Amino acid sequence: MDNQRLYLVTGAAGHLGRVLTERLIEQGQKVRAFVLPGEKMLPPNAEIFYGDVRDKNSLMPCFEACSNHDLVVVHCAGIVSISSKFSQILHDVNVTGSKNIADLCVEYGVSKLIYVSSVHAIPEKPHGMVITEINDFDPDLLVGQYAKTKAEATAYVLELAAKQNLNVSVVHPSGIIGPFDYGCAHMTAMIIDYCKGRLTSGIIGGYDFVDVRDVAKGIILAGDNGEKGACYILSNHYYTVAELLRMLSKITGRRRMRSFLPIWFVKMTAPLAEIYYKIRRKPPLFTPYSIETLQSNANFSHEKASSELGYQTRDMKQTLLDTVNWLKKQGRV
């Protein structure tokens, strides 16, 4: 008789980690949820473990007492940052934490590791070219500390796959958006600000945005069908900021956004905006790095994930509708 699967999800109190954990439990899977001490919005019906991915000793209990199960580890824990300044904790969590997880997966002989990287770890191609999966990751080819940390961590887990026979698959989500964000990620903040009338102007540009629920499903599929050492882009489609705001206007009935700031002006004021949001203790909507991202080539292809994993995405209008309705239920808009 085959062992039953046991999932360990790090960062299970975060947006993606919580959605993934709840979906696994809905499917009847057993889940160990690794969260920071003091987290309040814990996923229900999961076995909770407290600790910090930077502390290897705090991670070890998650890997123990599971001899009758095939342990599948999904490493979601990480910090997403559009800040233009260096952050030591960003490096320690995204790189050192990921190395700790990967090393423990080797030590305990886990059945599978799914590392949640990012499309930011993949070097940008010129506009007009399609961006697909790569095999070699070099932080020096990238701009921004967040991208560099994800590339360094991705390179490390793939090296363990080659040298230590670690069964790991890597997923690269694009810009995650959607309901069930109990924190305040950048896109959630934009939606809230729009619904409350605080967003008075948009910016010219866009990115590939994907529903958090589709990414969660893609991760599960990668656990089921992902090849050892393989990478899969979990993207959706490119949307301009203007397109997203038009959809939100139709959903909410609010006046359509007609003011879009020129790029030169946004670049000039972005450092001040970053300081302003820091004082308010809220995630900044626009920083020099985020502006560069919105002007970049975000033509990502998820053809490999669709053909090899069965990955599918939903319409962005549905994503935004579900997000607004959820925020209303939470009393946040």
Image (cartoon, rainbow, N blue to C red):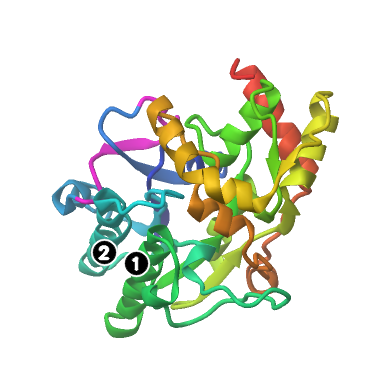
Depth check: give the residue in front, 158 or 275.
Answer: 275
Label of residue 153 in the image: 1
Left or right, 136 with respect to 322, comes to left
In percent of width and height, residue 154 lies at 39, 70
Q: Is residue 52 magenta?
A: yes
Residue at the (77%, 34%) spot, across then down? 248
Are circles 1 and 2 on residues that touch, CB within 8 Å?
yes
Residue at the (27%, 80%) spot, across then down? 164
Label of residue 78 in the image: none
- How many residues crowd mark 1 within 10 Å: few (<14), some (14–19), many (20+)? many
Magenta-highlighted residues = 40-54
Q: Is residue 45 at all visible to an observer of this figure?
A: no
User: What amino acid is found at the position of numbered circle 2 in the picture?
Assistant: Lys
Q: Main secondary structure of the magenta part?
A: loop
Q: Is residue 238 at all visible to an observer of this figure?
A: yes
User: What amino acid is found at the position of numbered circle 1 in the picture?
Assistant: Ala
Left or right, 43 with respect to 216, comes to left
Residue at the (40%, 30%) spot, across then down? 42
Determine the secondary structure under disc 2.
helix
Q: Quadrant of residue 303?
A: bottom right
Depth check: give the residue in front, 180 or 270.
Answer: 270
Left or right, 52 with respect to 139, comes to left
User: First in sequence: mark 1 or mark 2?
Assistant: 2
Residue at the (50%, 52%) spot, across then down? 288
In percent of width and height, residue 76 lies at 42, 52
Q: Name the image quarter holding the C terminus.
A: top right
C-alpha span from label 1 to label 2? 7 Å
Residue of label 2: 99
